[in-house]
Image: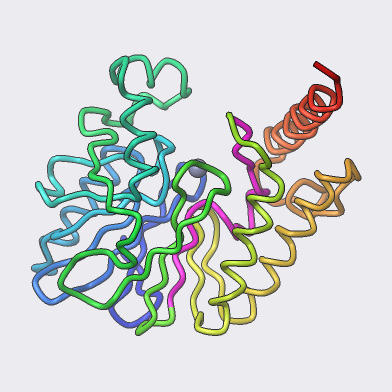
Amino acid sequence: MLRQVAEGVLIHQSEFVQSNAVVVQGRAGVLLIDPGVHGREMACLANDLSELGQPVVTGFSTHPHWDHLLWDDRLGAAPRYGTARCAANARDQLSDGVAQVAQSGGIPEQVPLDLLGLITGLPAEMAQIPWDGPQVRIIEHQAHARGHAALLIGERGVLVAGDMLSDVLIPMLDLNDTADPIEDYLAALRLLEGVAGDVDVLVPGHGSIGGADQVHARIDQDRAYVHALRDAHVPSDPRVGPSATYGKDWLPGVHARQLQRLARRSERDGTPG
Ligand SMILES: [Zn+2]
């Protein structure tokens, strides 16, 4: 079921971690961002789009995590893009085959993996998605995952935030081979803050759509969480607190693991030799 969130911008929310697929209407068809998760959901989306007479002409993955790299053949054979870093990272992950990714990632069975990660990297100097529709600006940053991109659809006042600015998920830092994940995350939040004035509708990768009033609130909330992680304070963050409405059984664990890994890093960095 597609839901319009701005003129010519529709979303389809998955049962899997409230993942949002985003459809942007162009002149000859649609741009599809992070298509979805379960096979039957993508099939339903493909069906809805064909009923609307809107073929998918371009695909985009916001970052190289499996739940954002999926595709279904019923969506057609449009070119699929990501940032150059995102595509390179997806290729690395797939170098030992899809089965290997499936084993390590805890991917549910209903997820079709045949077309996982088959994206083309856009050159770093390309500031917009190449397609025939409203301009979509690529705001690349190094928080959460390699080559993570937020997308600003300026004409529609929509910010597609990828896996940031969620009302249900805490910031999840990229702690793999990164020099300064805390500063990377804070820098990314500053970048998003820089465009916040142009945003009427905020679409996070997971969770609910936010209005203009939510943009700064969610940036502040994510920043406060990252500061708490940095300073090893207990975060007063509703997403992992007693009033959390989502992920009560697993998000506190994610938080604890992030704290632990950051503590181990600082011990390591503080040890001579
Ligand atoms: Zn992710």
Residue at 13% of width from left, 45% of height from top?
A: 74
Residue at 39% of width from left, 80% of height from top?
A: 154
Q: Give the magenta range.
A: 158-176
Q: Is 168 contained in the magenta span?
A: yes
Q: Is residue 66 above or below residue 97?
A: below
The C terminus - image quarter: top right
Q: Choose between 265 and 153: the one closer to the eye.
A: 265
Q: Is residue 66 above or below residue 144?
A: above
Q: Choose between 170 and 79: the one closer to the eye.
A: 79
Residue 133, image x, y percentages: 20, 75
Q: Is 175 contained in the magenta span?
A: yes
Overall secondary structure of the magenta stretch? loop
Left or right placement of residue 160 versus residue 167 in this view: left
Residue 196, image x, y percentages: 57, 77
Residue 261, image x, y percentages: 74, 27
Residue 247, image x, y percentages: 65, 41
Q: Quadrant of residue 25?
A: bottom left
Residue at 46% of width from left, 24% of height from top?
A: 105
Residue at 21% of width from left, 33% of height from top?
A: 115
